[in-house]
Amino acid sequence: MSFEQKNNENKTKKFDFDELEKELAFTDYENNAAAAGNEKSLNEKPLNEKPLNEKPLNEKPLNEKPLNEMLSNGDYENNDQAYGIVTAGVEPIEMTPTGSKIIGYVTADQRETVRLGTYVIIPYENENLFGKITKLQYRPEFSSDDATEIHTQRMLAKKGARINENDYKLLTSIDPICILYEKNKKGGLQRRMADRIPKPNTPILPVLDKEKVQVGLNIPEEGIFLGHLSVGGELVKTHQMPPTVAYYLRNDYVSGDPLIFRHMLVCGSTGTGKTFLTKNILRQFEADDNRYRLRSDPKLKSPPCLVIMDPQDEYSQLYEDSKVTEADQFSFDSEKIAYGGFQNTKTFVAKVEGENYAGKSKADQMEFTIPFAFVKKNPWILETAGLPDNQKNGLELLVEDYFKRAANKNNPSTYLGFKAFIEDPDNRDYYTEQTKKIHEASYDGIVRKVLNKEYGRVFDQDAKPITELYKTLFAPGQISVFPTEYINSSRIRDLIVLVMMTVIVNNKLNTSGNADIKNTPIILVLDEAHRYLSNAEGVMSGKIISKFAEAAKQGRKEGLGLFLITQDPQDIETEILKQINTKIVLNLNNDAAINAVKIPKDYEKRVPYLKKGQMIIHSPDNGDIVEITGLNSCVVKHE
């Protein structure tokens, strides 16, 4: 055949990878190590080479004790469950005061089960290193180059598995968390800092004992249930029943005050399940046996009062039961999770002219009104009108003088009386012309903004004044819900929430505060917290920010816990955010929001990928930072 004929034949002939393989003598890619530049087959073994699991009769085991005896304090009967072994063949095993380098080799049959963040045990003779996988890396077993055009095209054309796991090493980096040991049989499992280096060839084992997980991560064995430990959205499973590992928030006085009094934050974008999760958590605070010390007498304890600012009218449903399956009941009972509607839930409705509340819940309802007399000691409440500084100062002066004059004349202090006072031309002339205490333009601005008709709809309505309801509002063992969704005016909604915040904070911090508020353990739940705890101009007064910052600092002493809920944590005043010990972070897709919660960088990267119900828990006084997954079922009604 001439060269020309052969060339024309090649042009019409379809390219055949199998033919190319024969020409290159790659007759068996999977089992011929020549494909990796090695002369011997992967399955071929020299005559003098021992199998990997075969030991000479006179060879001593890695440790003085047999492996099954070494692991007798765990759940492992053999090494079939091991992910692999610690290896020094790739890099040296190191432990220093500032860091460590522990490399593990993962066996081929365990590679699909290993994930970033997986918790592991590496045994010593009589104790265990508890750690976490922080890096996964594939390396070729033999010297080869798979980054070539021919190899790539061949793999793309191949059907089925494109890799023989035996041709590659899967290596892990393990971050040691602590050493688990038993001081004595009565002392139980304890932990200390990781101060021992693991030996090469030691098995890397899954953690299948619930106690090891809890002690290893320093998680309390009981307390306020938040969710179940998970890695990458998959629940951590153990050999106990139920197999899940419950994550609790410390709720006793063994190591200080319960952590709710060091405050909590739940943050997540819209639609991530904040309300569902919050209902499940709040119900735990009203468990039958939950009690906190009274400030008046620390020897006495009482259940808390939950005060909930509810902008979407969702939390009154804490009163009602949810549909719970038998399987759920078994799990809840086993893990001491409170469930079912809380019967002592009450809805307190601010009476607003022209607005009617049609509640979703069957909980008892009671109307109240805000007396204008409340403004006497809190004139900044009227600053929701958006006053500049010079007008704020003028307003405070007018409020002070009005209440003095009303008291001298034995007149009731009402909003209508204050309105008449500042509209009086003689008073205007006195403040702007005779005494020059208020600039004319400022005075007119105060009148224009403070005399907004919306204030006339909320003050001094036909209902019982809130100042006469403290004993009812803040009763121990009660959930008091304050809905605001039914109110069309955002200014009135904000005013009601600010009044309630002020009532609680003022009475908790003042030595002469109302005894019903001061002595009752209170958990203040503030949804849309960024609206009220931000320094944004025209939204909030610096005075409430400073009071809340002080309340956050003294919460443990005063029996006041803040439970803040927001989708914009970056807008909450920094001084308040600093006082929050427990941060529950659901999915956030805003870099500013993620940065604001200040969690470790490796967890920051996970936040935008968290699925609904997944969350990161950062609570330094409770345990190590972890990922958990909330319950699939709501323990109370949620619609």
Image (cartoon, rainbow, N blue to C red):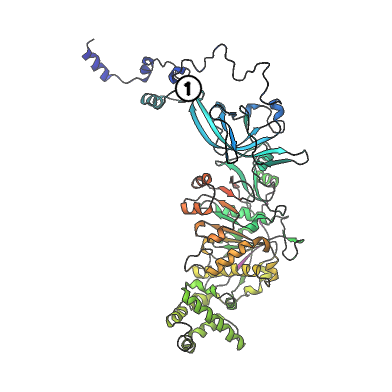
Image quarter hosting the C terminus: bottom right
| Label 1 sits on residue | 142
Dominant SS of magenta comes to loop
Q: Amino acid at mark 1?
A: Phe
- Residue 252: % across, % down: 71, 53
Residue displayed at 60% across by 84% down: 412
Q: Reply above or below: 143 against 130.
A: above
Q: Is residue 269 left or right of residue 368?
A: left
The residue closer to the viewer here, 17 or 214, is 214
Image quarter hosting the N terminus: top left
- Residue 635: % across, % down: 63, 51
Does the magenta-highlighted stretch encompass residue 72?
no
Q: Is residue 510 left or right of residue 159?
A: right
Residue 528 seen from this side:
no
For label 1, count other residues whose C-alpha is less than 10 Å away and answer few (under 14), some (14-19) or many (20+). some
Q: Reply above or below: 90 against 258.
A: above
Element at label 1: loop
| Magenta stretch, residue numbers | 335-353
- Residue 145: % across, % down: 42, 25
